Image (spheres, grey):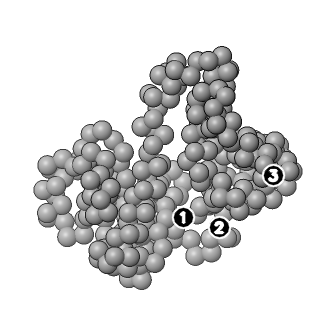
Amino acid sequence: MLARGTFLYDEVRFLLQQELRQPRSYFAVLEAVASGHARLNEIKQATGLEGVTAYLETLQNLLLLERVVPVTETQPHKSRRGLYRLRDHFFRFWFRFVHPNRTPLERGGSQMVYLTQVEPYLDLFTGPVFEDICQQFIWRLGMAGRLPFLPLKTGGWWHANEEIDQIALGQDAALIMEYKWTKRPVGVDILRELKRKATLVQKDLGQRQIWLGLCARSGFTAQLEQEATREDNLLLFDLPQIVSGG
């Protein structure tokens, strides 16, 4: 992907040119979203395009973008809290690492770009990928009857500056999840923070029974594992469990 002249180096531009009549406008929208402009007004300001909503709808139909709302919203299509994000992780990588480094890459600097601009930031980039995998993992557990309840829908939750990675909603219960793609085991401080966030979303969950869950790349501290034996509503999943499906 970083080597000039190879198949994947210009794949994003090639795909847009093949699929769309105005690739520059769509490219501008994707670039804006990839740069962190997630709300409709932000995308409009960043691109300066008229009728940006139509571009967003087309990109969603192509499965390149998605609009997400807090899972507790009762009318998602009317929600003002909707955020747009790149759905395809290949596009995420291209806009994050290839496009901003075109000048040195065009001069054959793929190795130096990788060492200085890609490798140090891969863990940060991979975090959202891990979240997607964990959400699929929770769905699989639920459909296999291996959660305390049947999830009917799942998704993230946010309000102001607060955010929860995933909430799986059932008829009478909810599982509030946090995902940690860190090199250190997750400790009790993360559990305390998750409990605090659970109080923020409590009013949106009604009378549902609350379960808490943590997915961690590097497992958990002994203190947290001991805490889990005393918590009836806490589920812990490490990377081997997630990869093997539980």
**Residue 104, image x, y percentages:** 63, 19
- Quarter holding the C terminus is bottom left
**Residue 3, image x, y percentages:** 60, 27
Residue under label 1: 70
Q: Residue at x 62, y 70 (%)?
A: 76
Quick one: label 3 or label 2, which is nearer the N terminus?
A: 3
**Residue 244, image x, y percentages:** 30, 59
How would you rate the neighbour count of disc 2 (Cα within 10 Å): few for under 14, some for 14-19, many for 20 or more? Answer: few
**Residue 48, image x, y percentages:** 83, 43
- Left or right: residue 116 versus residue 216 is right
Q: What is the three-letter code of the residue carrying label 2?
A: Ser
Give the Cα separation between the discs numbered 1 and 3.
30 Å
**Which of the numbered marks, if any, corresponds to residue 79?**
2
- Left or right: residue 157 versus residue 181 is right
Do callouts 1 and 2 mark residues in contact (Cβ within 8 Å)? yes
Who is closer to the viewer here, 160 or 149?
149
Quick one: label 1 or label 3, which is nearer the N terminus?
A: 3
Give the Cα separation between the discs numbered 1 and 2.
9 Å
Q: What is the three-letter code of the residue carrying label 3?
A: Leu
Q: Residue at x 56, y 39 (%)?
A: 93
Callout in the foreground (1, 3): 3
Numbered disc 3: secondary structure: loop
Residue under label 3: 20
Do callouts 3 and 2 mark residues in contact (Cβ within 8 Å)? no
Q: Residue at x 67, y 40 (%)?
A: 11
Q: What is the three-letter code of the residue carrying label 1?
A: Pro
- Left or right: residue 215 versus residue 56 is left
When asked about the image quadrant of residue 166, the answer is: bottom left
Numbered disc 2: secondary structure: loop
